[in-house]
Amino acid sequence: GSFNSGKKRDNYNLDDKNANHIQVETGTTQMDFYNMTLENGNYAYRSPKTITAAVEQKVTDFKTFAAMPQAQFNTRLPELMDVTNLVDYFILIQIMYLPDNLGNNIMLTRWSDKFLFMPYDLDNSFGLDWSGSVIHPTNLNPIDNKPDLPANTVQFWHKIKIALSTQIAARYQQLKTDGIVSEDAVYTILKEMEIKFGQSNYKREFARWTLPSAGITSLQQILTWYKQRLVWCDSYLLN
């Protein structure tokens, strides 16, 4: 964990003078992948500094791909998207339950010839709603349980699952076998963060801010929720 990882181009190894280093950030609304527009604040460029017609065409190519019927979508996907990244991103969305990182809090990024999805702002995770006042059930698909997510973007993510179901299942099983997707792994990460920041900083945090989640979440709540979540993910990601 770190307090220093912000949305800085350097953190993504982006050179804003390089026309191949493209990063698109979601705007003030949930992104409709079929109809991304700059005019309504749906997305914004973070790189490169100079937006040429060639740069805009690459984003247009993504929009065109996103809207394709399943068969064409399957063919075009490995040509335009980094499949390894996309598989891992899809699994991350599911195991942590990240409905706010499907059409928002996404950095659509490319350094060469393929786009990758980069997550940002994971305050809606491990079942906790972004408001900090609600714990979501463990058996929900975030793709279908984000009311303001555009229907086109919902369809996009379902097409990803269909196109990459074999790769997703294999990767998910590998992560489970290697102990990366496990209660023990989450416990270790959270305890390391607790030790790193120290009790004094946590006390200062609680004294400074009113935390809506203080009475409903805890280390044990996260671990219990995650254990039950992985049961649901087994049934969804391995099929």
Image (cartoon, rainbow, N blue to C red):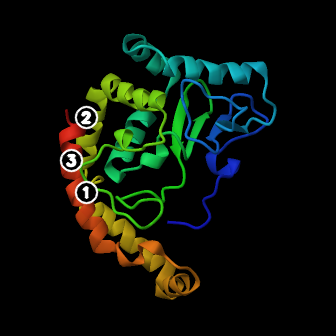
The mark closer to the camera, 3 or 2, is 3
Which picture quadrant has residue 31?
Answer: top right
Question: Mark 2 Cα within 10 Å, few/some/many (few <14, many 20+)?
Answer: some
**Local SS, label 2:** helix
Residue 83 can be seen in this image? no
C-alpha distance separating marks 3 and 2: 16 Å
**Local SS, label 3:** helix
User: What's under tag 3, amino acid-wise?
Assistant: Trp
Locate residue 195, reporting x and y percent: 43, 79
Of pointers 1 and 3, the one earlier in the residue sequence: 1
Task: Please count the marks in the image.
Answer: 3
Compared with 214, 23 (above or below) is above
Q: Which residue is mark 2?
A: 170
Locate residue 239, reporting x and y percent: 19, 32
Q: Along the line of sight, which residue is nearer the eye, 22 or 67? A: 67
Question: Mark 1 Cα within 10 Å, few/some/many (few <14, many 20+)?
Answer: some
User: What's under tag 2, amino acid-wise?
Assistant: Ala
C-alpha distance separating marks 1 and 3: 13 Å
Locate residue 232, reporting x and y percent: 21, 47
Q: Which residue is mark 3?
A: 232
In the picture, the disc for residue 182 is 1
Question: Mark 3 Cα within 10 Å, few/some/many (few <14, many 20+)?
Answer: some
Which picture quadrant has residue 171?
Answer: top left
C-alpha distance separating marks 1 and 2: 16 Å
Residue 221 can be seen in this image? yes
Q: Residue at x 51, y 18 (%)?
A: 65
